[in-house]
Amino acid sequence: MKAEDIAIWTEKYRPKDFDEIKGQDEIVRRAEAFVKKKNMPHLLFAGPAGVGKTTLALVIARKLFGERWHENFLELNASDERGIDVIRVKVKDFARTKAIGDVPFKIIYLDECDALTKDAQQALRRTMENYTQTCRFILSCNYSSKIIDPIQSRCSVFRFKPLSKEDVFKIIERIARAEKLSIDAKAKQALYEISGGDCRRLENIMQSSAAIRNRITEDLIYNIASAAHPKEVRDVLKLCVKGDFLSAKNKLLETMLNHGLAGLDVIKQVQQEIWRLEEVDDKRKLEMVKECGEAEFRMVEGSDEFIQLEALLSKFVLINS
């Protein structure tokens, strides 16, 4: 698919009204109240990726400024432009001019602002103070703890949460109707589990699947997402429970090679499937999850992933022996 086609597709499904934003009802009500009064403080959006932070900022701008929202809205990605010069030049130049229309302020949206350096955050704090009359800031981040306290105290904080299963299913059904796709119940469940409440990842997987065929199945989704089928991971764990280490090791290696999985991807799926093992009591499940954490830590620190996964399987066998 061409870049311009993707842009058109994204714009087509991007919500343009508050009631289209799913899974953040309390946050949307607060934002809508600010828009109705045509006044708002600086806002800080904190939460995981793909849950509607940027979308809500764009809806606020559309509702406040109408057709002229592009002229009164500046969007910057702080992870690309994270130095102090961006705040001193780009942000200040936009903030010092008056808004066009009957709303007395412009909006500057800083995405991923937890990537800003400390010096840039201090400069941003002063800019927020000096240009309050002509500009409001919407800051977006994954971790609010990385934003300095003086900025947090100047903002109304909105904490976003991952989308629930019901909300994800509603989004799937809306896109399926619009694109004339056929999706069964198992495929919906697979989309929810792989996306983890991230709407952006959900839509990317659906778009890739739809490019192959209109009937989307569970197997197709796992192939597109380069993830192991839960049954394959569960089979590996069952072999460990039975004490068959060599078969479990070979099965895991085969699964990783077939799907092109990295060690950290496998650890996450293994941890999820442990809780679904009916053959193991809760105490042993806790021990197995604890070992997952140890193996993940070593992988992040740079250890060989295959050695760590073999060691993890051996510990599973010992725990269940």
Image (tube, rainbow, N blue to C red):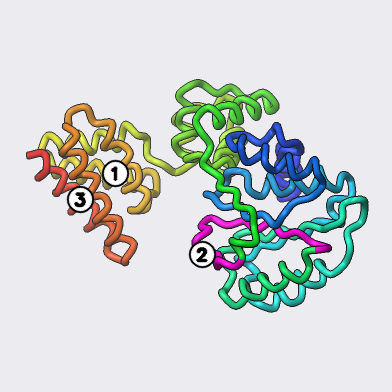
Proximity of marks 3 and 2: CB atoms separated by less than 8 Å: no
Q: Is residue 127 above or below residue 109?
A: below
* Mark before the other along the chain sequence, 1 or 2: 2
Secondary element under disc 2, as helix, strand or loop, is: helix
Q: Is residue 103 left or right of residue 300?
A: right
The residue singled out by tag 2 in the image is 146
Q: Nearer the viewer, mark 3 or mark 2?
A: 2
Q: Is residue 163 left or right of residue 235?
A: right
Residue 81 falls in image quadrant: bottom right
Disc 3 marks which residue? 312
CB under 8 Å between callouts 1 and 2? no
Of residues 200 and 119, the one drawn nearer to the viewer in this rendering: 119
Callout 2: few (<14), some (14-19), or many (20+) C-alpha neighbours within 10 Å? some
Task: Give the quarter of the image for residue 100.
Answer: bottom right
Q: Earlier in the sequence, mark 3 or mark 1?
A: 1
What amino acid type should be assigned to the residue bearing mark 3? Leu
31 sits left or right of 252 in the view: right
Nearer the observer, 230 or 126:
126
**Left or right side of 116 for 249:** left
Q: Residue at x 58, y 22 (%)?
A: 182
Tell me the CA gap for discs 3 and 1.
16 Å
Which is closer to the viewer, label 1 or label 2?
2
Give the alpha-carbon distance from disc 3 to disc 2, as whole Å: 33 Å
Across and down, in percent, residue 294 comes to 24, 56
Q: Quadrant of the N terminus?
A: top right
The nearer-to-camera label among 3 and 1 is 3
Q: Amino acid at mark 2?
A: Lys
The residue beneath circle 1 is 254
Residue 86 sits inside the magenta stretch? no
Q: Which residues are magenta?
A: 133-150
Disc 1 marks which amino acid? Glu
Q: Dot 1 lies on which element?
A: helix
